[in-house]
Amino acid sequence: MAAFVPRKVFPTLNSLPRSYFLGHHKAGLDKMKTMLSHTDLIIECRDYRIPLTSRNPLFEENLAGRERLTVYTKQDLGREGHYRDKTRERLIRDSQRPSAVLFSDYKDRTSVRKVLEFARAHAIAAESLTGSRMMVVGMPNVGKSTLLNALRGVGMHKGKVAHTGAQPGVTRKVGTTVKIIEGDESGEAVYLMDTPGVFIPYVPNAEAMLKLALCGSVKDTIIAPTTLADYLLYHLNLYDPSVYGEYESPTNDIVQLLDALARKTGRLQKGGTPDLEASALWLIQRWRNGHLGRFVLDEVTPAILEAERTANESIGLSLNQGRKMMKELRKEKSRRKRLDTH
């Protein structure tokens, strides 16, 4: 039998939607801008598994003028403790200078305390008499509300105050401030404000959209689950195809894998037909929860970081592109509905 050879590239899918910039995203961003004068620090969350793709330049453009801390969340889902992980993190830190960077896992109290220590030091330096107010921002479903709950739990020893969920859009409005550090003789209290996730107005390429969808930044109904599962299979094979070995031998055929998975997990429709869509969603969720390997989807090198910096300097047109794209999508949906009724 010939040795298994994984795909080296994933086919370009130009038909994929390239925007998910919804009404409450713009409303949330507009509200954040009005709160800027009352904010001492911006804490921007990005997904550790897609450190470049989960960056939204709209925050830098619209929330400028405040010190920024970038927290790469869900570190536990993308890090294995190898030397390459440390190298990647060093490159990311260097690329963000002079802004501060932290890597966080909400289940790891030590990493949560590092965020609290930064917030405390910043609050002391600000010398506010009424307490320091900070704002947490980020793309949809990158873990903003989860981070807020973890900070409050460790800092105040209190329970959750922000709702969280597996799908994006749980937080749809800018919330009230929540105390995460109690005031004492060394400084005043620190308050953090939760905000809705704001998507990139226009995604520059189809693969970036696949990465964002795979990590849960768009609803699972936006891109066909089998397409998303196929993109996941592409990465699983590059990482280690044995992670799905209990269901099927190494393969580049997503239908073959989903068929085998459906039969072994009982995801069958009437008549015993494998439910490929349900199997695809289950496979995706298994990876999101860290059960099918822990790896990063973005390649991070000095050259790529420089290219990203250059590309993001042209973000000014993105908002108009996003509006145009959403308008075209609505027109296309209306056209399809009319055709379906005839």
Image (spheres, rainbow, N blue to C red):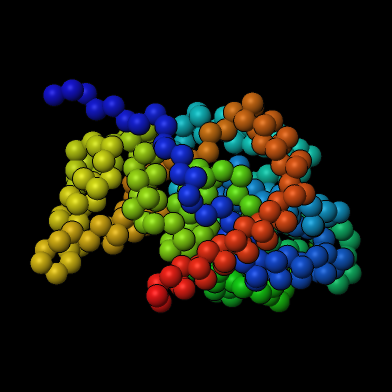
Residue 240 in the image: above or below residue 39:
above
Q: In the image, residue 74 lies at what x, y percent?
A: 51, 51
- Is residue 278 something one can see in this rendering? yes
Corner quadrant of residue 273? bottom left
- In depth, the one of 269 and 66 nearer the eye is 269
| One can see residue 146 in this view | no
Q: Residue at x 89, y 69 (%)?
A: 129
Residue positioned most to the left: 271
- Say left or right for 335 vs 56: left
52 vs 40, nearest the viewer: 52
Image quadrant in which the C terminus is located: bottom left
Tell which residue pokes out farthest to the top in this image.
2
Residue 55, above or below 158: above
- x 80%, y 65%: residue: 33
Q: Quadrant of the N terminus?
A: top left
Q: Kindly indicate the quadrant of the structure image that contains residue 280.
A: bottom left
Q: Position of residue 216 (x, y in %)?
A: 48, 57
Q: Is residue 306 left or right of residue 103?
A: right
| Image quadrant assignment for residue 264 | bottom left
Q: Position of residue 284 (x, y in %)?
A: 36, 54
The residue located at (79%, 57%) in the rendering is 62
Q: Residue 57 at what x, y percent from top left?
A: 71, 49
In the depicted structure, whether residue 70 falls above or below residue 92: below
7 sits to left or right of 20 = left
At a point 48% along the width and 49% down the height, the residue shown is 15
Q: State how many labels appear.
A: 0
